[in-house]
């Protein structure tokens, strides 16, 4: 155990933030996988609503600093391109 109080606090905060960030990233990855799997089988309206939900999650992750702005833009562009090509 460290004697430095600020160091132990920093460690706790970083572990807490890391677990939160992993949850956000995991949710986004799961939604993207299910969207890509359902892309060919679902109809256009279902795809559009799920795409909107994924966009919302990506934007919230970018706002909270989990994802970089360009990473979020790349993910959204990839999803739009996948919908257009299918």
Image (spheres, grey):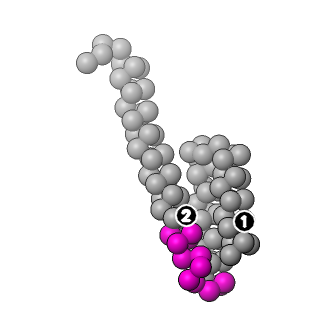
Task: From this view, report whether residue 77 is shown above or below residue 8.
Answer: below
Tell me which corner region of the image, top left, top right, bottom left or bottom right, holds residue 75.
Answer: bottom right
Point 61% across, 57% down: residue: 58
Q: Earlier in the sequence, mark 1 or mark 2?
A: 2
Q: Secondary structure at mark 1?
A: helix
- Residue 82, how many percent across, how many down? 67, 67
How packed mark 1 is, by other alpha carbons closer than 10 Å (few <14, some 14-19, many 20 or more), is: few
Furthest residue in direction left, as rendered: 1
**Which of these two is toward me, 22 or 30?**
30
In the figure, residue 54 lies in which quadrant?
bottom right
Please check the rendered image and state whether residue 37 is part of the magenta-colored stretch, yes or no: yes
Q: Quadrant of residue 1?
A: top left
> What segment carries the magenta color?
34-45
Q: Residues within 10 Å of mark 2 (few under 14, many from 20)?
A: some
Please say whether residue 85 is one of the residues in the magenta stretch: no
On the question of residue 73 being in view, the answer is: yes
Residue beneath label 1, please?
81
Looking at the rendered image, the disc whose residue lies closer to the viewer, 1 or 2, is 1
In-image side of 75 versus 31 (left or right): right
The residue positioned farthest toward the top in the image shown = 3
Q: Position of residue 78 (x, y in %)?
A: 68, 59
Quick one: quadrant of the C terminus? bottom right
Residue designated by label 2: 32
């Amino acid at each position: 155990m460290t004697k430095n109080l600020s160091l132990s606090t920093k460690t706790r905060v970083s572990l807490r933030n890391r677990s939160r960030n992993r949850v956000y990233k995991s949710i986004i990855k799961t939604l993207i996988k299910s969207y890509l799997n359902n892309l060919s089988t679902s109809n256009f309206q279902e795809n559009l609503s799920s795409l909107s939900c994924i966009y919302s999650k990506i934007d919230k992750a970018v706002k909270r600093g989990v994802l970089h702005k360009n990473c979020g833009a790349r993910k959204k562009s990839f999803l739009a391109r996948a919908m257009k090509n299918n």
